Image (tube, helix red, strand yellow):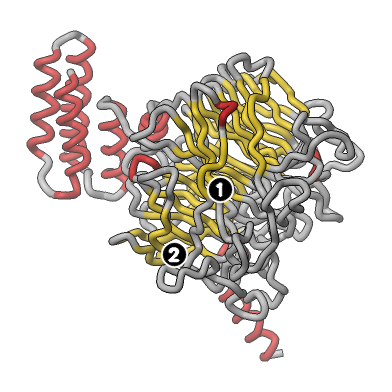
């Protein structure tokens, strides 16, 4: 018995904290259901939900992947929800009451969308894809690559170009070049098997030492914005090459151990011959590539000619899946899609470094591991769950991310301290089924103009709003909401910036209060001066308002106040 007790104690020490200590977490024990599962949330409110439209689901087979929702892109007052069966466009001008605008049937999977102006890009990798969007895979010309639609009329998208690729397009990334405003570039990440040369000339399955193999590369498509029908592949860079030997398979070519650390077989296998996903951050000339067996940093200062500049590996990672950079470019988060998104990988027996995020600090162009972050509560064995798509939430002064975990729901976490990430909000539903693993859950969760939008594989489209809590003040939420985009693609990361405002000043004030660096009489004095300045500004007494702001700024001494002092000065100068 003592041996059993000792073994259990050891196991408890290895388990995620949630599996041991958070037995009261409301996400544990949620009732099952497709459209009527029980829900749990903290500091995150579900504002709206729409089921998948007719024709985009099979009620007799809920988890059918050929009809699954996939990724999300946002443009103006609309959201484009990708699907393995085509895409749906929703009007989100009233976020609490979204409506379906357009459904387009165009099979081929995954159907990941991106938007740029009046252009919509869709990834296609399945052999059933057809150039004409036909639904009969035995009729018409096969298509695997990137579709381009003109969405000037959102109710009537028109396909204007199709760019074929040897491994299709599992995902793609839009990349802008500040020196080339007349074009947008598309980095194509193909992870499917190489198609026969009979369907696309020059495609081959040659080894790395063979003649021009179709693996160990990405494709770069150049799209003339004035003539998108002329889009074409202009480069096939070998991002995994060994800089010393020139071998194109210069990164991880075999798993780090015979079996996954869990004792299971590797699945997927972390061997680098493609990127699964690339996130570009043109403002800093850098991209982060999640490339199956490695995470890499890429110089994209010349968008048509990307160059790898750094790489990392991790013995716990089964599949480097996606990436997000911090706004200042000093951190990068890579996700591990252990189980390929189809398996239950958030069980009580799954360690927090398996199927998790790995957070790295970036210094002098190199990546240094800081910590892991995994959904801090176990899920059942019938819920597919692992780290998936995410985006930053523009809370000033902090690094906060919203992330999809399939049937693990949404998790919002703060990684400002890269060594100690912490969850600050969540939303979850019970399993689709408590008796059989049925594919479902959130594919993506992205912040856009004050709300979080989620694509649910089996259940539809969701809209969320953050709520005030001990972790996040209303001023911080309001300051984030002041950051507005005309369009948003998670893989084309925008630079976040905040205009001077009283809300911004108070957001920084709240952070100082939370950290204990502003309290007592100093806090009272701060609030008094800022409140008075706002009253003066509303009464058109701008000089008096400036004087109040500069006066309190002058009283704050020490590096801990640099950010709020800067915000006070900027606000004063803007009045």
Q: As rendered, which of 430 and 482 lies closer to the eye?
A: 482
For mark 2, does the 10 Å Cα neighbourhood hold few (<14), some (14 to 19), or many (20 or more) residues? some
x then y, percent, for residue 35: 79, 36
- For the residues labelled 1 and 2, the Cα–Cα distance comes to 19 Å
Q: Can residue 390 be seen here?
A: no
Residue receiving disc 1: 219
The quadrant where residue 379 appears: bottom right
Determine the residue located farthest toward the top in the rendered image. 540
On the rendered structure, is 364 left or right of 347?
Answer: left
Picture residue at 86% right of the left edge, 55% below the top: 435
- The answer, for residue 177, to whether it is visible in the render is yes
Residue at figure coordinates x 43%, y 50% from the top left: 306
Q: Which quadrant, please, contains the C terminus?
A: top left
Q: Nearer the viewer, mark 1 or mark 2?
A: 1
Q: Which of the pair 52/431 is nearer the observer?
A: 52
Name the residue that disc number 2 marks: 311
């Amino acid at each position: 018995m003592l041996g059993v007790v000792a073994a259990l104690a050891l196991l408890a020490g290895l388990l995620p904290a949630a599996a041991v200590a958070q037995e009261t977490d409301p996400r544990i024990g949620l009732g099952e259901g497709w459209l009527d599962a029980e829900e749990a949330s903290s500091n995150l409110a579900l504002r709206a939900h729409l089921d998948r439209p007719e024709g985009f689901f099979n009620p007799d087979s809920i988890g059918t992947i050929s009809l699954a929702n996939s990724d999300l892109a946002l443009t103006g007052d609309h959201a484009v929800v990708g699907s393995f069966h085509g895409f749906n466009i929703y009007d989100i001008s009233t976020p609490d009451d979204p409506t379906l605008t357009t459904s387009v049937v165009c099979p081929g999977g995954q159907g990941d969308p991106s938007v740029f102006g009046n252009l919509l890009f869709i990834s296609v990798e399945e052999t059933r894809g057809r150039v004409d969007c036909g639904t009969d895979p035995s009729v018409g010309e096969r298509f695997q690559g990137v579709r381009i639609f003109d969405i000037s009329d959102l109710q009537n998208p028109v396909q204007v170009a199709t760019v074929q690729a040897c491994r299709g397009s599992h995902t793609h990334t839009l990349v802008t070049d500040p020196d080339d405003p007349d074009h947008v570039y598309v980095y194509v990440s193909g992870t499917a098997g190489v198609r026969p040369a009979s369907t696309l000339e020059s495609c081959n399955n040659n080894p790395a030492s063979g003649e021009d193999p179709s693996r160990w590369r990405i494709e770069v498509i150049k799209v003339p914005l004035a003539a998108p029908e002329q889009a074409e592949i202009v480069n096939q860079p070998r991002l995994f090459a060994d800089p010393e030997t020139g071998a194109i398979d210069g990164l991880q070519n075999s798993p780090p151990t015979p079996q996954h650390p869990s004792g299971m077989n590797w699945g997927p296998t972390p061997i680098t011959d493609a990127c699964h996903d690339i996130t570009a951050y043109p403002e800093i000339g850098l991209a982060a590539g999640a490339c199956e067996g490695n995470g890499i940093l890429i110089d994209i200062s010349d968008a048509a000619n990307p160059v790898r500049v750094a790489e990392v590996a991790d013995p716990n990672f089964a599949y480097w899946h996606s990436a997000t950079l911090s706004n200042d470019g000093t951190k990068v988060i890579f996700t591990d899609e252990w189980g390929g998104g189809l398996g239950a990988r958030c069980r009580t027996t799954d360690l927090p470094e398996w199927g998790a995020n790995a957070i790295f600090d970036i210094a002098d162009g190199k990546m240094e591991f800081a910590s892991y972050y995994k959904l801090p509560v176990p899920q059942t064995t019938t819920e597919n769950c692992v780290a998936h798509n995410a985006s930053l939430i523009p809370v000033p002064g902090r690094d906060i991310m919203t992330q999809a975990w399939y049937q693990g729901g949404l998790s919002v976490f703060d990684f400002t301290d890269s060594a100690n990430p912490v969850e600050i909000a969540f939303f979850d539903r019970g399993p689709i089924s408590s008796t059989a693993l049925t594919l479902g859950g959130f594919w993506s969760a992205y912040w856009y103009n004050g709300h979080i939008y989620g694509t649910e594989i089996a259940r539809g489209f969701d809209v969320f709003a953050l709520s005030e809590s001990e972790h996040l003040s209303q001023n911080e939420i309001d300051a984030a909401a002041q950051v507005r985009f005309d369009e948003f693609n998670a893989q084309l990361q925008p630079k976040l910036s905040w205009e001077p405002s009283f809300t911004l000043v108070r957001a920084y004030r709240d952070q100082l209060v939370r950290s204990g660096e502003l309290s007592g009489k100093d806090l009272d004095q701060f609030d008094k001066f800022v409140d008075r300045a706002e009253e003066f500004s509303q009464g058109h007494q701008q000089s008096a308002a400036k004087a109040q702001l500069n006066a309190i700024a002058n009283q704050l001494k020490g590096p801990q106040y640099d950010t709020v002092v800067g915000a006070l000065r900027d606000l004063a100068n803007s009045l």
